[in-house]
Amino acid sequence: KELGIHPDTFNSMKFRNSIPYPQILNFLNERNISINYFFYGSSPKDQLECENKYKILKLYKTNASLGGGGINDLIDCSELIMDEKLLNFFGSKECEFITCYGESMEPLIKDGSICVIDRNKTFKNKSICVINTRDGLFIKQVLKQDDGVILHSLNPLYEDIFYKNGDFLLIGVVIGELSRL
């Protein structure tokens, strides 16, 4: 009756394996009853422990260039579930991940790796950063100048690039890298 369904109808639905999920979910929500507790017997406390142990972060699948600049008309984003211990290793709980391509930052950052970026970390001279420019998205070592920045490649085969103040946007500081062996 609490579900708004006659008991005979409910029994018939159970027999046909046709559970009235919308009515059950509304019933649980109105009474502030945990859905996991109702269906699986798991305590809401267990859920909190899980939420404290793992974090959902964003992975941007872009053309972040380690070389000549990546153009990104459409940015695809997916979610990663990360263990807090790994985030503690990187020293950031609010980091994001970005795929990167090119060889200009080798041997430190490899082609096809995933860079861990922190948008809130304070920029320091010579930090490796994600920078957006009119020429595309770069991952480079940033050398601060009075009138702009020099984007420096660690690979000596690539030349430095200079951008005046106002011609670039610092997206975040690279705090780590994930790559295959």
Image: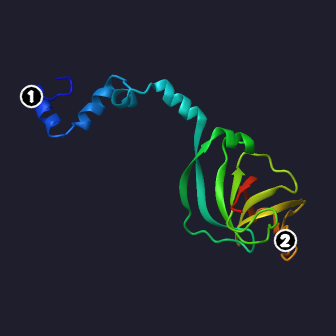
Quick check: can you spot residue 172? no
Residue at image position (67%, 67%) is 112
Which residue is more in the foreground, 46 or 71? 46
Q: Position of residue 101 (x, y in %)?
A: 69, 69
Residue placed furthest toward the right: 146
Sort mark 1 into few (<14), some (14-19) or many (20+) by Cα contacts within 10 Å.
few
Q: Position of residue 21 (x, y in %)?
A: 26, 37
- Using the numbered discs, state the Cα–Cα distance from disc 2 to disc 1 in whole angstroms: 75 Å
Which residue is more in the foreground, 55 or 180? 180
Q: Where is 111 relative to 30, above or below?
A: below
Q: In the rendered structure, which amino acid carries the disc numbered 2?
A: Asn
Q: Earlier in the sequence, mark 2 or mark 1?
A: 1
Q: Where is 141 relative to 24, above or below?
A: below
Residue named by callout 2? 155
Which residue is more in the foreground, 169 or 62? 62
The image quadrant where one finds the C terminus is bottom right
**Label 2: which secondary element:** loop
Q: Which mark is residue 8?
A: 1
The image quadrant where one finds the N terminus is top left
Residue at image position (90%, 60%) is 146
**Label 1: which secondary element:** helix
Sort mark 2 into few (<14), some (14-19) or many (20+) by Cα contacts within 10 Å.
some
Q: Where is 167 relative to 28, above or below?
A: below
Q: In the rendered structure, which amino acid carries the disc numbered 1?
A: Asp
Quick check: can you spot residue 76? yes
Q: Where is 39 relative to 86, above or below?
A: above
